[in-house]
Image: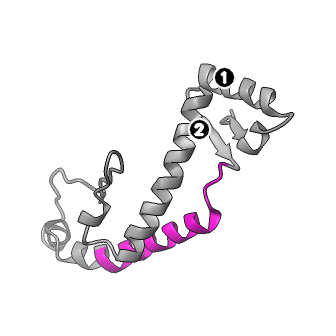
Amino acid sequence: MEIPVLDFSKLEGEGRSETMASLHDACAKWGFFMIENHGIDVELMRKVKLLVNWHYEENLKASFYDSEMAKNFENDGYISDKDWESTYFIWHRPCSNINELTSLSSDLRKAMDDYIDQLIKVAEKISELM
């Protein structure tokens, strides 16, 4: 079982009809697909990943040890229902809230803002193709 992979670089030129057929097939049979050569800057993706990892390493490790969850580990080891993930909800349209997330570094906020702009372009392209 393999997830369908679409190469968006083939949308321009002779490979367009084959890629469009693959898109149709992926939507009809799978409901999802992976995209290669989507146009999002590889260096920007690397930077976002690096900054996100750094953020979690620097900020969440310290706050975890001060949390009720960690303190329960020290006591009886029982933890009631807890949310085991830490997330940030970022919206970008019609306007962005990225600058309200002051716990994120300015470098990470800028990188995420740039990344989301490029991601929206890919989403719009997919919408047009469907």
Mark 2 crowd level (few <14, some 14–19, many ≥20, 10 Å Cα): few
The C terminus is located in which quarter?
A: top right
Determine the residue positioned at 15% across, 53% down.
Answer: 80
Residue lying furthest right? 14
Please state the extent of the stretch shown in magenta in the rendering.
38-59
Q: Provide residue 117's location: percent of width, then percent of height.
A: 48, 54
Mark 1 crowd level (few <14, some 14–19, many ≥20, 10 Å Cα): some
Picture layout, residue 73 above or below residue 23: below
Determine the residue positioned at 68% across, 32% down.
Answer: 1
How much space separates mark 1 and mark 2, taking CA atoms? 14 Å
Picture layout, residue 7 above or below residue 51: above
Q: Nearer the viewer, mark 1 or mark 2?
A: 2
* Label 2: which secondary element: helix
Determine the residue positioned at 61% across, 19% down.
Answer: 28
Q: Could you tell which of marks 1 and 2 lies nearer the N-terminus?
A: 1
In magenta stretch: residue 42? yes
Q: Provide residue 19's location: percent of width, then percent of height.
A: 75, 31
Q: Is residue 10 left or right of residue 67?
A: right
Where residue 109 is drawn, which disc sits there? none
Q: Which residue is mark 1?
A: 24
Q: Provide residue 101's location: percent of width, then percent of height.
A: 26, 65
Between 31 and 103, which is closer to the camera in this rendering?
103
Picture layout, residue 107 above or below residue 24: below
What amino acid is labelled 1 in the image? His
Q: Is residue 121 left or right of residue 80?
A: right
Residue lying furthest top? 28
What amino acid is labelled 2 in the image? Lys
Q: Which residue is mark 2?
A: 125
Determine the residue positioned at 23% across, 53% down.
Answer: 83
Q: Main secondary structure of the magenta part?
A: helix
Between 3 and 107, which is closer to the camera in this rendering?
107
